[in-house]
Amino acid sequence: MNSKLWSDLVKEAFDKTLIVTKFFCALHLTTTYVFTPAYVFGPSMLPTFNISGDYVLAEKISTRLGKVGRNDIVLIRSPEDPRKIVTKRIVGVEGDDVRYSLNPERDDTFETIVVPKGHVWIEGDNKYMSRDSKNFGPVPYGMIQGRIFWKVWPFESFGSVERRTI
Amino acid sequence: MVSLNFISSLSKNFFTYGLKGLTISDRYISVVPVRGCSMSPTFNPHCSTSLEGSTDDSVLVEKFCLQKYEFSLGDVIVFCSPNDNKEKCVKRITALPGYWVSSPFSNDVVKIPDGHCWVEGDNSASSLDSRSIGPVPFHIIWPLKRVGKLEQRIPSGRFVF
């Protein structure tokens, strides 16, 4: 009598575990291949994103297809610390001539660089307070984690995030 | 005559197991074929330019390390080439961030910046590696553990300090 109870319990535990596993797989696949939510904060993308933080959605499909291009805002792994994912705008793709200023608050001197093959040039919208390609150079395309396309919270700015030049 | 029910249940099972396999291969462990001679004799020991891809080694690649991005000197890693996002390269880490690397071929000493590492193939004669493409940023890196364990080894003949 006891053994039947046990075997029922084991079967039910197994079924529940299977459901949890399926859910976890579906979550992983959606987050890796389709889209993912993200929390972006910091001063480097003012005025596009708040300093205290916005919730956004980033899609992964254009990244995988190689269709991420100029003026897209992307989540990208920082080349200085691979554990950190930062939000910046792509200003130049491979082959582009990029003109940038090292000290925007101090002087008007510019430098020019050609973006090498397989790399992108990223810059924050707030050029006075942003660590980006001006500091660490062009970043390999493979570091891009997703393209931000929708702002979820704060509710007043709910809506799509389009490509546009600053 | 195979019934529709049978086909639909078979394809549903196939789909479910396929998705679970994909999740496991993305996050935990996966199998990768190694092509080319740049890692002889560790991989593809009988490689020669006349036999194109006759018996390529396949290796087991673990991805647990991607959670913390901690690698040691001498690990063999799989990474996407910085010059071409779709091309995967297999090389050994010979210097970590903060190290200085000199090579017998040039008079420069390069300091490895934070978040980058220096990779080289075991077969120095024919491999395109950090000596030509500079420090490689850690991204999509999967260290290798073969069945028949792989040792961590540091090549001699370099000053790495």
Image (cartoon, rainbow, N blue to C red):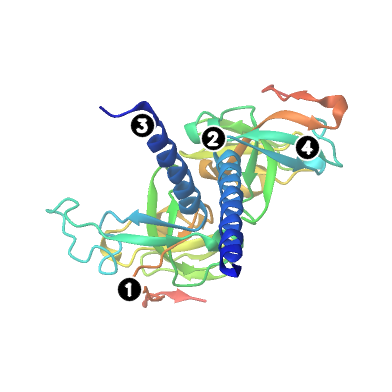
> Label 4 to label 3, Cα distance in Å?
43 Å
On the image, the x and y values in percent for residue A102 come to 71, 42
* Dot label at residue B7: 3
Q: Which mark's residue is nearer the viewer, 4 or 3? A: 3
Q: Which SS class for mark 2?
A: helix
* Dot label at residue B148: 1
Is there a contact, CB below 8 Å, between mark 4 and mark 3?
A: no
Please state the chain letter of the residue tagged with numbered disc 4 in the rendered image. Answer: A
On the image, the x and y values in percent for residue A96 come to 53, 30
Please state the chain letter of the residue tagged with numbered disc 3 in the rendered image. Answer: B
Quadrant of residue B35 within the rendered picture: bottom left
Is there a contact, CB below 8 Å, between mark 4 and mark 1?
A: no
Q: Amino acid at mark 3?
A: Ile
> Label 1 to label 3, Cα distance in Å?
40 Å
* Dot label at residue A63: 2
Decide if residue B148 is on the left or right side of residue A152: left
Q: Which residue in the protein does label 4 denote? A: A55
Please state the chain letter of the residue tagged with numbered disc 1 in the rendered image. Answer: B
